[in-house]
Image: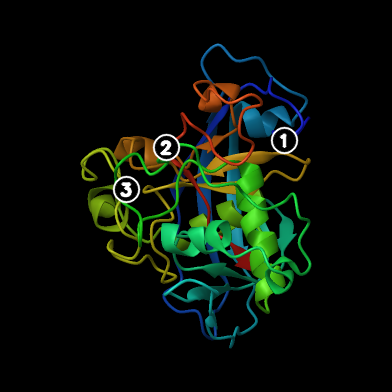
Amino acid sequence: MNSYLESSELPGKLAQPDPKPKVPTTMNAIVLKSCSIIFVALVGLGCAGSGRDQNWIAGETVTSASVDSSPDDRVPSSTSIPGSATALTAVPIPAGTLDGRPIAPFFIAETEITWDQYLALVTEADDADAAEGIDGYARPSKPYISMDRGFGQQERPVISISARGAEAYAAWLNARTGPAWRLPTADEWRYTAALSLGSTANALSQHAWHAGNANGKTAPVGTSRPDALGLYDVLGNAAEWCTDGEGGYVLAGGSYRDPAATLGTLPLVEPSPTWNASDPQIPKSTWWLADAGFTGLRLVHE
């Protein structure tokens, strides 16, 4: 499969699991627990299939996420972001398995990346120190229009960014801080979601910003209730870029625009060229998506 950065002809597809996890109540001395999710994957309307495993794209499969029995005594990490008023806190996720595949332990940011944090990259002075370790062409340009859709910025999740823009932020953060930040893989995201969804459908509105409670816009991060792992907005608010293991990208978790029932199915969506159709620039921006005011990111590190 071609990556979104290499092709403008990728079809959009929707994978919709139905989670029913059992969630561990603590991150320390976790004993063996299993979280099962039913993934019902539906091909997007009118879209053709790709070469990806069709059990993942279409059909029905039972996905099982299990946590290793060994204790996990790691504590959350905190990383200061140059040019931002807020630090990036990451929560440890224990090792385990997803569909029988091993998942190594990692840390995942407790919130989605905010405008304040992302614009630190966009507006940073282009001096030798700032550019250290970064390709001079890998710095996102300032958007030609307001990409926040009038919702506001500061502590709201950054939106309208492409997968390339998300990767550029991780590369910049790596060059400017200590941890090796990156986008999560789709498996890491699904594994985290299986462990973190400690709320019933009736309580979803306390944990996620969706079409029924978001008033048509994103909300500042950390203003919903945290989930069982201490994470905010794993579902809703901004959809989150993940790598798909085949050189491409998918969005996970849904956004403020999606009904609560849709969020509960954990959609995984491939990017579409329609997300930047109205960009009048020639060539179109590779950093910003003029018609995708729902794409955001959350980072992980080892």
- Name the mark on residue 218: 3
In this rendering, does residue 151 appear at all?
A: yes
Task: Tell me the element at label 2.
Answer: loop
Residue indicated by mark 2: 293
Question: What amino acid type is highlighted by mark number 2?
Answer: Gly
Q: Residue at x 43, y 57 (%)?
A: 115
Question: What amino acid type is highlighted by mark number 3?
Answer: Thr
Q: Residue at x 78, y 56 (%)?
A: 135
Distance between the alpha carbons at the discs numbered 2 and 1: 18 Å
Q: In the drawing, does residue 92 fall left or right of residue 264?
A: right
Q: In the drawing, does residue 74 fall left or right of residue 223?
A: right
Q: In the drawing, does residue 223 fall left or right of residue 124?
A: left
Residue indicated by mark 1: 5
Residue 264 percent location from the top left of the image: 39, 43
Distance between the alpha carbons at the discs numbered 1 and 3: 26 Å
Q: Quadrant of the C terminus?
A: bottom right
Q: Quadrant of the N terminus?
A: top right
